[in-house]
Image (tube, helix red, strand yellow):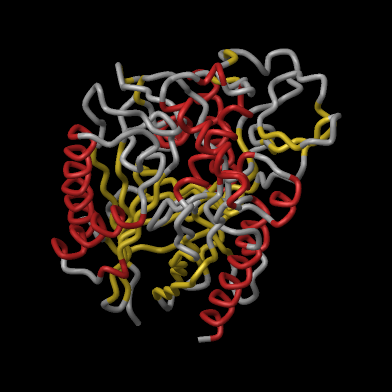
Amino acid sequence: MAQLKTGFARVNITPPMGINVAGYYAVRLADGVLDELEADVLAIELDGTRVALISVDNCGIPQEKSDAIRKAAAEKNGIPFENVFLASTHTHTGPDIAGFTPIGAIEDDYLAFLTVRVSDAVGFALADLKHSKMGWGVGMAPNISFVRRFRMKDGSIQTNPGVNNPDIVAPIGEVDERVNVLRFDREGADTIVLVNFGDHPDVVGGCKISADWPGFLRRSFEKAIDDTKCIFFNGAQGDVNHVKVHPNPGDFNDMFNDFDDVSRGYGHARYMGRVVAGAVMQVYDKVNYIDVPTLGVLQKTVQVPSNRPAPEDLPKAREYEALHQAGRDDEIPFRGMMLTTVVAEAERMLRLENGPDAFPMQLTVISIGPIAPLRVPGEPVTGIGRALKEANGWTLVLPVCLANGSEGYFPMQEAYDEGGYEARSSPFRAGVAEFIIKEGTEMLESEAKA
């Protein structure tokens, strides 16, 4: 019987200063480094099949650029393109190569650097392959993730309406505090721990480079447990973040109220990383070891209708976009997160004014025995993650966001009906979340029967 092998590698991908920082609809130029950015690779081999699971500290890499990085890594290391998977952690204090702000020479140079570094890391991980056994567990990370969509007293729906806003009625939705853990014990080498948990790494703010709380997670866990390496893949996080709108005493420690009425702070990112690391440690010693008889990849490309604007909405979109580009946001009649929402909505409308009518989207299931990471090329909301985890035939399903692409938000139908940042900015038509649930579940259950 074939023996499971795993390997790990980590390389530094910190960008030069002056590069655009991703995550907001405003220019931020990197002017310092709080902590280094990394690319981590978990290589898996079984019965002649090799896959490379790559996690990079970045806000999101569009599919075209992601495909180029994956192709370079595949060709350099002699593994199939389809078996190379690239996911972003979604830090909002990393370099912008997606185009949130204008892309220039420094961003192009960084993309070339990142491509080489990822290829190198895949090669290092393959060279590190060791005989392994795999275990799994599910921990809990309480009180660090919160729904960010709220019903307001005037009947409107707002995303991130601000801490202690008296007009908040109630949150819309439910968070998922489960932390999925895979443990790979290796002969004569460090144990590799894969962590999957969904929450926005938009905690630090400012213009200094940071991996945000996923970086603290990796460092905290590896410091606490000797001879381990930790790789993180973000989950279904499109409608949750770290903001507790009604904080208790102490909750606001190490935080400040930022320009968009979102509370942020480097110390809070440290706190979140430690909480998630603690969730991993809850189950680390008591994982359920299981056989891994198969390693497979199933990919499917589906067509998703685009969220094209109504003609009557375009004049206002052009007005807001022109004001924003001219640096005259104060003339747009919104503030805080609502300003971000209308600017993002305007950019979405103008981008899709002339089509396309649909986008190709690639969904990927990786079967590691009875464990199935399912990779989605954008930002699924928690409703998607919860539904996919219920697919029949699997011991554990790990939804992974921003994998092999960063194509936008995938909100549930009710978000389109009610409003909010995610739906108003999404390039996809209403029904996209339910479509992903249907297609993803069918892929998972057909692969389970194969």
Q: Residue 276 lies in what quarter of the image?
A: top right
Picture coordinates of residue 45, whole percent (x, y): 30, 69
Residue at x-position 84% and y-position 36%: 155
Picture coordinates of residue 348, whole percent (x, y): 50, 45
The correct choice, above or below, for 117 with respect to 91 in the image is below
Tell me the quarter of the image containing the N terminus. Answer: bottom left
The correct choice, above or below, for 312 with respect to 51 in the image is above
Front residue of this view, candidates 102 and 64: 102
Residue at x-position 47% and y-position 67%: 363
Count of marks overlaid on the render: 0
Front residue of this view, candidates 196 and 302: 302
Front residue of this view, candidates 206 and 86: 206
Q: Residue 141 lies in what quarter of the image?
A: top right
Picture coordinates of residue 5, whole percent (x, y): 31, 65
The correct choice, above or below, for 35 with respect to 177 in the image is above
Can residue 368 be seen by looking at this rendering?
Answer: no
Can residue 124 be seen by looking at this rendering?
Answer: yes
- In the shown orientation, is residue 364 left or right of residue 336? left
Front residue of this view, candidates 234 and 219: 234
Picture coordinates of residue 376, whole percent (x, y): 48, 59
Residue at x-position 58% and y-position 65%: 436
Q: Residue furthest bottom?
A: 450
Residue at x-position 48% and y-position 55%: 182
The correct choice, above or below, for 439 with respect to 34 in the image is below
